[in-house]
Amino acid sequence: MNPRDPALDGELDAPRSTQSLPSQAHGPGGRIEVVCGSMFSGKTEELIRRVKRALYGRQKVQAFKPRIDDRYDPTQIVSHGAIAIEAVPVANSESLMRRVEDGTQVVAIDEAQFFDRGIVEVCNELANQGRRVILAGLDQDYLGRPFPPMPDLMAIAEEVTKVRAVCTVCGGAASRSQRIIHEGSTVLVGGSDCYEARCRTCFRPREVRAGES
Ligand code: ADP
Ligand code: MG
Ligand code: ZN
């Protein structure tokens, strides 16, 4: 067995927390913010609002969206109210991580529920590097079930904001996305042609409109 190098003593004996400290390359303000709710609840609008404020503050921002969501524009994040910002479409969490540039202080991600589970570790890593990560996504699927990986992202976030739409049946605050066409897959990308915002009382999982298939 080799004798222990005395020069390494300090490092070897250092407490774990100081050995594994992240680089904090972007300052100490790293954090994760999640904006979640049903469809039409204003998640994308809120994400865009936060991005615009960061830009006013001269922060370097990069916005991403999953390639699966090309409802309006493949290179923009567009709200149902038609406000938009530029965004890079990425196939998965690994591709997103590779595209984050040095010096980027704010990473915005829309439709986070369409990412693979790896997005959880990617967001943790980006925040550990001192970056502000803002995610918007559906907290529930069309049957009202937690929509992975949103629950895990909400758990590790510093801040979670739930936003609500207006229920199209009773006008109350809506927390659910009612699928109004007959389609059984969890992922069905669409707008008001496929979904309605509903409150807990008016939400009818699996209900389809008469005459539609
Ligand atoms: P999300 O990203 O949560 O799906 P958006 O931010 O894209 O929502 O869009 C929110 C906008 O959708 C609202 O400002 C409003 O103009 C429009 N909208 C359409 N239907 C509804 C509804 N039922 N409740 C609230 N807003 C609605
Ligand atoms: Mg949206
Ligand atoms: Zn209702």
Image (cartoon, rainbow, N blue to C red):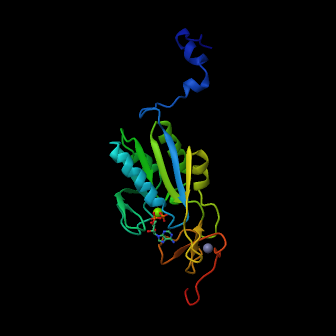
The x, y position of residue 179, in whole percent, is 57, 75
The x, y position of residue 185, in whole percent, is 58, 72
- Write down the quadrant of residue 17 in the picture: top right
Q: Residue at x 43, y 60 (%)?
A: 45
The x, y position of residue 67, in whole percent, is 42, 61
- Residue 91 visible at all: no
The x, y position of residue 66, in whole percent, is 45, 59
Q: Residue furthest right?
A: 201
- Quarter of the image that includes the C terminus: bottom right
- Quarter of the image that includes the N terminus: top right
96 w.r.t. 20: above or below: below
- Determine whether, in the image, residue 44 is placed left or right of residue 145: left
102 w.r.t. 151: above or below: above
Depth check: 150 or 16 in front?
Answer: 150
Depth check: 19 or 142 in front?
Answer: 142
125 w.r.t. 94: above or below: above
- Determine whether, in the image, residue 60 is placed left or right of residue 125: left
Q: Quadrant of ligand 3?
A: bottom right
- Write down the quadrant of residue 198 in the picture: bottom right
Circle count: 0
Q: Residue at x 34, y 47 (%)?
A: 55
Q: Residue furthest bottom?
A: 211
Depth check: 192 or 168 in front?
Answer: 168
- Residue 104 visible at all: yes
